Image: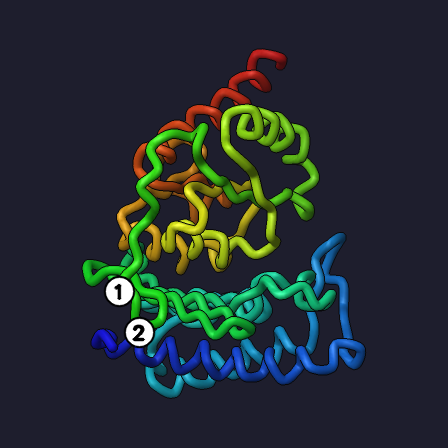
Amino acid sequence: MHALHPMLHIAVKAARRAGAIINRAARDLDGLTVTAKRQNDFVTEVDRAAESAVLEILRKAYPDHATLAEESGAAGASDYTWIIDPLDGTTNFIHGFPQYAVSIALRHRGAITQAVVYDPGRNELFTASKGRGAFMNDRRLRVSRREHLRDALVGTGFPYREIAHLDEYLRMLKGVTQNAAGVRRAGSAALDLAYVAAGRLDGFWELGLSAWDMAAGSLLIFEAGGLVSDLDGEANYLDAGHVVSGTPKVFVQLLQVVQAARDKRAAAA
């Protein structure tokens, strides 16, 4: 087992605690209480319990650190901020579709330095520390060797919450579908980004995300040798909410296709 950075070790402990809560709840999905936060955006008592468990562990270890969590929002002020999605893929979880994960990242002075994405159903633990590489359980991760979008399997997510992005997204989807080997939509951006790092996907893009959907996965990809940006090819994806990622060469081609769809919108306007 590779040695974990002390802060990453705490994050892994928190992710596994949340995963245990999720796995227990998965045995009795009919007993879940589900609440709609807004259209097509759901929360369960499992999300809240998992987040509470994560926050308890992180705050006990680092009481002076700030937190940004999906269900409870922002708390504290510090150069260190933990960015937490206790259950990314809640809609999948509610329906028993086994594609969801816990995502925890640490941002230090604007840079993501630690990352955990944990799939409790498969017991797959994706971890990264800045400058130390990315791993799945004990295996070092590298993005795939694919160089051409035409050979690439590309992940995506529908902008089901941000309906204003739908027409723009559909143009992008058409362009990627015409130029890639295949497109997949599994429903957990955090896990999709981890899959890019693991070489299971060659690229991924999505619109209308939150920082907690992308923070951990982005570091996994960088540490596995891939690239991540916003739609302008810049590093502002956590704030912009739009992300493009992939192997170095697939990333460039995917970004070009996505940007071409935006240019068509601008020309039509």
- The answer, for residue 174, to whether it is visible in the render is yes
Query: Residue 131: x and y, percent?
Result: 19, 59
- Provide the residue designation for mark 1: 129
Most distant residue in the bottom direction: 60
Q: Are marks 1 and 2 in contact (CB under 8 Å)?
A: yes
Say how the picture is coloured: rainbow
Most distant residue in the top direction: 267
Say if 170 sits above or below 24 in the image.
Answer: above
Task: Decide which of 141, 156 is in the foreground and name it.
Answer: 141
Callout 1 amino acid: Ser
Residue at x-position 53% and y-position 42%: 206
Tell me the crowding category of disc 2: few under 14, some 14 to 19, or many 20 or more residues within 10 angstroms, Cα based. Answer: many
Say if 93 sits above or below 110 in the image.
Answer: below
Q: Is residue 43 left or right of residue 13?
A: right
Q: Is residue 113 left or right of residue 254?
A: left
Badge 1 element: strand
Badge 2 element: helix
- Provide the residue designation for mark 2: 8
- Mark 1 or mark 2, which has the lower sequence index? 2
- The answer, for residue 108, to whether it is visible in the render is no
Say if 108 sits above or below 208 in the image.
Answer: below
Residue 137 position by quadrant: bottom left
Most distant residue in the right direction: 30
Residue at x-position 37% and y-position 35%: 251
Say if 87 sits above or below 143 in the image.
Answer: below
Query: Residue 93: x and y, percent?
Result: 66, 67
Query: Residue 227: x and y, percent?
Result: 32, 42
Tell me the crowding category of disc 1: few under 14, some 14 to 19, or many 20 or more residues within 10 angstroms, Cα based. Answer: many
**For residue 267, which numbered disc appears in the image?**
none
Residue 207 position by quadrant: top right
Callout 2 amino acid: Leu
